[in-house]
Amino acid sequence: MLEEDGRESLTWTVIDVTDRHQLAKELAHQADHDALTGLPNRRALNEEIGEAMARATRHGSLLAVAILDLDGYKPINDAHGHEAGDSVLCIIAHRLRGVVRKTDFVARLGGDEFVLLVEDCADMDELEAVFAKIEVAVCASIVLPEKGAHVTVGLSMGVCLYSPTNEMGPDVLLRYADLALYQSKTHKADRSRYWARYGEAIPQRQNIYQRILAQGGVDVYYQPILNSRRGQIVGIEALARLLDHDGRIFYPEAFLPQLTLEDISNLGELVLSQALTDLAKLDALGWSLWISLNKAPAAFGDHCVSQMAGIIAASGIDPSRITVEILESSDFLEHHAALSVMHALKELGLHLALDDIGSGYASLLRLQELPVDKIKLDQGLIRALEARPQDLHFVRAIQDLAMELQVDLVVEGVEGLDILDAMITMGVPHLQGYAISRPLSFADLQQFLSCHELVDQKRPEGLFGCYAGSMVFHSTIKKMILLNPADLDRDALSDARRCEAHGVLSRLGYNDGSHLAGLHEAYHHALGKVAKLGLGAFNSPEWGAMEAAFAAFMDGILEEWGSRKAEKCVTPI
Ligand code: C2E
Ligand code: MG
Ligand code: MG
């Protein structure tokens, strides 16, 4: 007899030693049973398994050989001691015995490992019902008899089904069940059930994002893109969101790393068809925009181009209004296959953009070889411009590169009005960021488009824009001095009042006589001297003096900008 604390009652210790028959019986029992739990041991299992196989063959029924292993048993042993560990094993043994039928067999192999032979099941459903009961029984809370503490254990199980047709012997059955157990244990983090069947893939648990995706909880948000010259919204970027039924919204940063490539490719199709449907609705409302979609390069599978072609053809949208954004930050572009996908997309009539330029990878160097129509400057770089205004030089260099390669340039991460001012002043053609609009739901996008007005703002609007404009002026004028000085009006260059920045400074309240206007004048004075030297100016002391005067002017602008910002105590957008 087993009690709930699992120990066998001590009947065998009080046998009459003179009763040889009884003694032999007890010795045989000890040889076949585990002393701690009283369950049959490995030796008994070896005998029983052959008989169970023979019965299954005779009855044509299912026999499942299952090896079960406790999860979280060792920590209990470590924390509460071996006696407590023994109690847990005895209690689990008792529960297992209680949950299966009398005709089923439960043995302890040693340690925290048990074997079950479940017989006479008609089908897998019946067997799964038994496995469900086992899980409930094992995982229920355990009260340690010695301490009264509550502990719990989990379990993993490997199952091998016996089939008379495939001639497996008992050893093979056990080995396969053991392999399945190993599989189950190695997939503890992502398995959807505690048991694994030999020869079958482990059913994986869906994470929350996969579940939402499977339930169709995909929403597409749109971020407007501004044409800086026309002051008009000309395009939108489609950005995926996952919506849970309780109203939570998940962003790509959270869900993309948790999705498989197949999931991402399915998501891409959903986003594409939703975005094209919405684009057609905007057309009907009189807003004719182009649309950008993100494509994970790794999800460029075999059928990707044909699938996209199908969705685009069904939408009736002109493919030239669609841009596929490819993330620069991957080594995808190094692969030959990638190029052929890109060419195939171009053949469909789509435009291609290289996304997040400046975020770390070097495909910028390969830009010339790639069939791209657009480059998008990384938002991280743009957002940091206020802290690192000198990086405006990088924006300027990319602008030049885009012009040389005849590709469009979109700057992302235009988060504040100062950066917006700087980008417009510098003549960056397309802008995207919170200062224009955050990504919007389709309903909010329509609202935004109906309210967005063309404002003919004088540029630069503020000192940061003035800083950017002066930087562009200075680098352009230096190139002209070195390359074609004959085209320059040298007298005009030495007169600060004839420079555009003079008007800007007075508009911003820095009239002649102010410190900043003085720095501007000094710069032009130095510039005029250099311009007079022409081609030979580069190594002259005048050149050095001009650079120093320019640096002082630029520092002066930043200083004024900083103190005005501090005074204004700007509210975040
Ligand atoms: P991305 O393509 O570079 O998209 C721009 C991201 O910058 C968006 O984040 C947008 O909300 C954010 N952003 C735009 N302007 C500003 C700004 O001024 N300040 C700041 N702090 N952030 C700004 P989101 O929507 O979280 O998307 C993140 C990335 O996830 C995207 O970067 C894109 O690479 C990827 N992604 C989005 N939708 C999809 C999709 O449908 N499929 C795939 N494969 N990737 C997607
Ligand atoms: Mg993008
Ligand atoms: Mg981007």
Image (cartoon, rainbow, N blue to C red):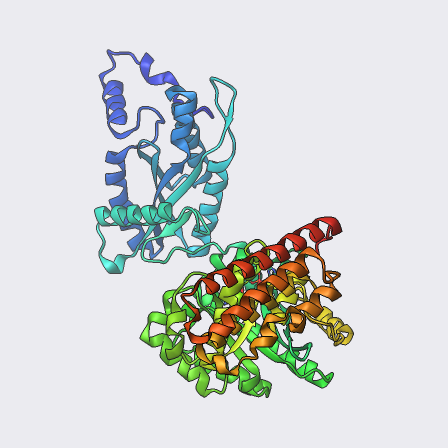
Q: Is residue 539 visible?
A: yes
Q: Is residue 561 above or below residue 529?
A: above
Place of residue 140 in the rendered image (x, y in percent of width and height, measured from the top left): 51, 35
Q: Is residue 423 above or below residue 205?
A: below
Place of residue 390 in the rendered image (x, y in percent of width and height, measured from the top left): 52, 59
Q: Which residue is at 32% across, 75% downward?
A: 336
Near-viewer residue (445 or 527):
527
Place of residue 524 in the rendered image (x, y in percent of width and height, measured from the top left): 59, 67
Q: Which residue is at 66% across, 52% downward?
A: 562
Q: Which residue is at 74% across, 49% downward?
A: 567
Near-viewer residue (348 or 402):
402
Q: Quadrant of the N terminus?
A: top left
Q: Is residue 383 left or right of residue 186?
A: right
Q: Is residue 63 above or below residue 416?
A: above
Q: Quadrant of the C terminus?
A: bottom right
Q: Which residue is at 45% across, 41% downward?
A: 134
Near-viewer residue (14 or 166):
166
Place of residue 415 in the rendered image (x, y in percent of width and height, measured from the top left): 63, 61
